[in-house]
Image: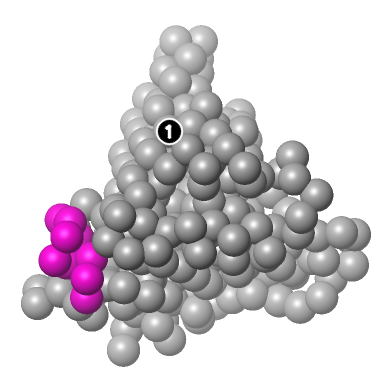
C-alpha cells in the first residue's frame, strides 16, 4: 500500500499511463486485490470528508441547506452554485486519481469474480460509482477540464462497475447520478493533457447506457 502511494503521482516525471501500469503490477494476487479495494475506499472516504467539510462551512456562512449524500453528489454541486472546490487531485490520503486510483480500478475490474469471494462487493460497487459521480461532477460543475487521462479513468470506472454488477447474483439498483446521466446525451470536448488542443469527445451517458444496461 505504501509503495503504491508514495512512489507514484503527479510529482513523478513518468507519464500517468506508465505509472498506472507500474502500480497495476504491484497489485498482484489476493493481497494486491485487497489493497486495490482499500485504495478505492480510502479515496472515496477522503473525497466525501472534504466535500462534507466544505458544505458545512458554506452552510454556516449562508444558512443554505446543503445536504451531502454519497449516492448522489449532483444536487449538492447544483445547490452550491460554483462555491465548492473540486479537490480530487489534492486529497489528504495522497492517492492520485490517474495513477493509484486508476490502477486499483483496473485490478478490481479484471478480477471481479475473485472480488466477490474476498470482500463485500456492494460497498465497493458504491465507492466505484461514487468516484465516477465525483469525476463527472467536476467536469460539469467544478470547471475541471476534460482530458484523455480523465476519460480513461471514467471508462475504467464504468467498465469495473459493469463487471462487478455482472458478478453479483442480484446487483443493486443503479445510483441516481448514473440514471440521470443515462437519460442525457451530452458530449464533452476532450483535451490533450499537454495542451489545450481538443482531440475528441466523450458522452458519459452514452458510455453508461452501452455498458450498464446490457
Residue 177 in sight from this viewpoint: no
Residue 30 in the image, given as x and y percentages of width and height:
27, 61
User: What residue is drawn where x is 34% and y is 31%?
Assistant: 67
The residue to which callout 1 is attached is 46
Residue 208 in the magenta stretch? The answer is: no
Residue 117 in the magenta stretch? The answer is: yes
Residue 133 in the image, given as x and y percentages of width and height:
45, 54
Instruction: Decide which of 46, 104 is in the foreground and name it.
Output: 104
Residue 25 in the image, given as x and y percentages of width and height:
51, 64
User: What residue is drawn where x is 44% and y is 52%?
Assistant: 131
Instruction: Locate the N terminus and report the quarter of the image it occupies.
Output: top left
In this rendering, the answer to whether 55 lies above or below 24 is above
**Is residue 76 found left or right of 213 in the rendered image?**
right
Residue furthest left as drawn: 169
User: What residue is drawn where x is 80% and y is 49%?
Assistant: 13
**Is residue 166 found left or right of 117 in the rendered image?**
right
Helix, strand or loop status at disc 1: helix
Binning the other alpha carbons within 10 Å of mark 1 as few (below 14), some (14 to 19) or many (20 upward) gives some
Instruction: Decide which of 12, 135 is in the foreground and name it.
Output: 12
Q: Which span is picked out in magenta?
A: 113-121
Amino acid at each position: 500500500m505504501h509503495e503504491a502511494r508514495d512512489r507514484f503521482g503527479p510529482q513523478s516525471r513518468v507519464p500517468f499511463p506508465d505509472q498506472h501500469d507500474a502500480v497495476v503490477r504491484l497489485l498482484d494476487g489476493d493481497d494486491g486485490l485487497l489493497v486495490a479495494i482499500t485504495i478505492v475506499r480510502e479515496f472515496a472516504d477522503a473525497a466525501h470528508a472534504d466535500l462534507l467539510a466544505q458544505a458545512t462551512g458554506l452552510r454556516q456562512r449562508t444558512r443554505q441547506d446543503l445536504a451531502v449524500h454519497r449516492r448522489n453528489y449532483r444536487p449538492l454541486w447544483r445547490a452550491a452554485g460554483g462555491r465548492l472546490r473540486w479537490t480530487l487531485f489534492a486529497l489528504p490520503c495522497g492517492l492520485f486519481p490517474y495513477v493509484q486510483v486508476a490502477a486499483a480500478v483496473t485490478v478490481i475490474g479484471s478480477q471481479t469474480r475473485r472480488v466477490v469471494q474476498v470482500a463485500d462487493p456492494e460497498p465497493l460497487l458504491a465507492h466505484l460509482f461514487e468516484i465516477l459521480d465525483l469525476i463527472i461532477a467536476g467536469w460539469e460543475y467544478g470547471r475541471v477540464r476534460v482530458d484523455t487521462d480523465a476519460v480513461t479513468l471514467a471508462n475504467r470506472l464504468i467498465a469495473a462497475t459493469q463487471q462487478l454488477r455482472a458478478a453479483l447474483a442480484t446487483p443493486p439498483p443503479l445510483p441516481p447520478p448514473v440514471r440521470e446521466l443515462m437519460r442525457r446525451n451530452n458530449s464533452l470536448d476532450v483535451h490533450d493533457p499537454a495542451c489545450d488542443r481538443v482531440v475528441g469527445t466523450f458522452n458519459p451517458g452514452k458510455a453508461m447506457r452501452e455498458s450498464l444496461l446490457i
